[in-house]
Amino acid sequence: MIPRIACVLLIVLLVNAGAEEQVRSTQEELRRRNLYFGDIDGRRSAEFEEAVKRYQKRKGFTASGHEDPETLRSLGLLDRSPNEPRPKELSWPAEPILKSDEKVDVVREASELATSTGIAPETVGPSEIKLVPIASRSQTKQQRTSHTSQPVQNSPAPHGKSHAQATQTVDPAEIVKFVKDYLRATERGNLRKELCFYADYVDYYSNGTVDRRIVEHSLRKYYARWPHRHTDLEEIFGFRVNPRTALITVTYRTTFALRNSGTRIKGATDNVIVINAATSSPRIVAIREARLRP
């Protein structure tokens, strides 16, 4: 009986060791692609699963968060049998294409920002964000400075005007104009103008809520990677108004074309932005995008 138990335990240990090695290898590959910034320890975590999902979305796979054979083969971690067809993944380069393709390392961004501007990292890092109540993140009046952009003033709604009053007269034409103006700002290389569309804190492409200055620093690197950009608004599917919070959720589809010195990319995305309407100048407080398969 004892030898049988020992044999079972040995098998369990070998299986666990193999699983840990697979996770560790996946962590290394995802870190190389700037999608995972946690420890290379062979352990599954929420951060690791989110990184796997991000990679799967980039490749057009089902975003399960698990290292299925299709994902492992795409990462080069699992051999393909001679007669097995290649996975139906998007034939785009490995470098990040969409803004949502790359995980924003807030700690690293804050450190780089501090080096280039002298801003204390703790003023733009997660510790400050945690101190700001969620309900007031999009309406804070704290003065912020940047080496290019001026502070964004999220002024409250006019005196005596409730959230419900601020959103009950939403004009669909104004929503369309807001989205078009925002898209024009994103493609013209005028980062200062684009930043005027964002609130001081933004729930940014599944990165959680980040300081607007972190968004700026991340965008600088993205636009350096893709200096030539064009975006067309294909369709606005609709918008939803929450009178209690004065938030407007807009869903729309865009087509885009990106170009740098060696690559040209075309594609389409479905997008969601959440606009805080309880201010004199509406600001984006959350943004998402999902790549469409060609």
Image: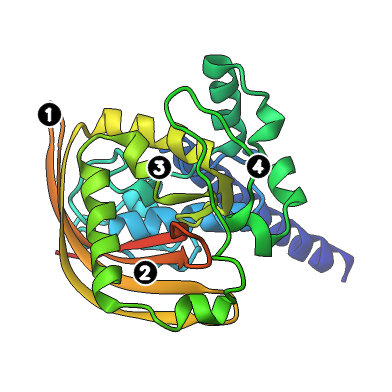
- Residue 246's x, y, as percent? 53, 74
Residue type pointed to by label 4: Gln
Question: Label 4 to label 3, Cα distance in Å?
Answer: 16 Å
Mark 4, residue position: 142
Question: Label 4 to label 1, Cα distance in Å?
Answer: 42 Å
Q: Earlier in the sequence, mark 3 or mark 2?
A: 2
Question: Label 4 to label 2, Cα distance in Å?
Answer: 41 Å
> In the image, which is nearer the foreground, mark 4 or mark 1?
4
Mark 1, residue position: 262
Above or below: residue 107 compared with residue 201? above
Q: Earlier in the sequence, mark 2 or mark 1?
A: 2
Question: Label 2 to label 1, Cα distance in Å?
Answer: 29 Å
Mark 2 element type: loop
Horizontally, is 185 left or right of 159 in the view? left
Mark 2, residue position: 62
Q: How is the structure coloured here?
A: rainbow
Q: Please say if the residues under marks 3 and 2 sit with CB atoms less than 8 Å apart.
A: no
> In the image, which is nearer the foreground, mark 4 or mark 2?
4
Mark 4 element type: loop
**Residue at x 57%, y 47% (from the top left corner):** 210
Q: Which mark is residue 195?
A: 3
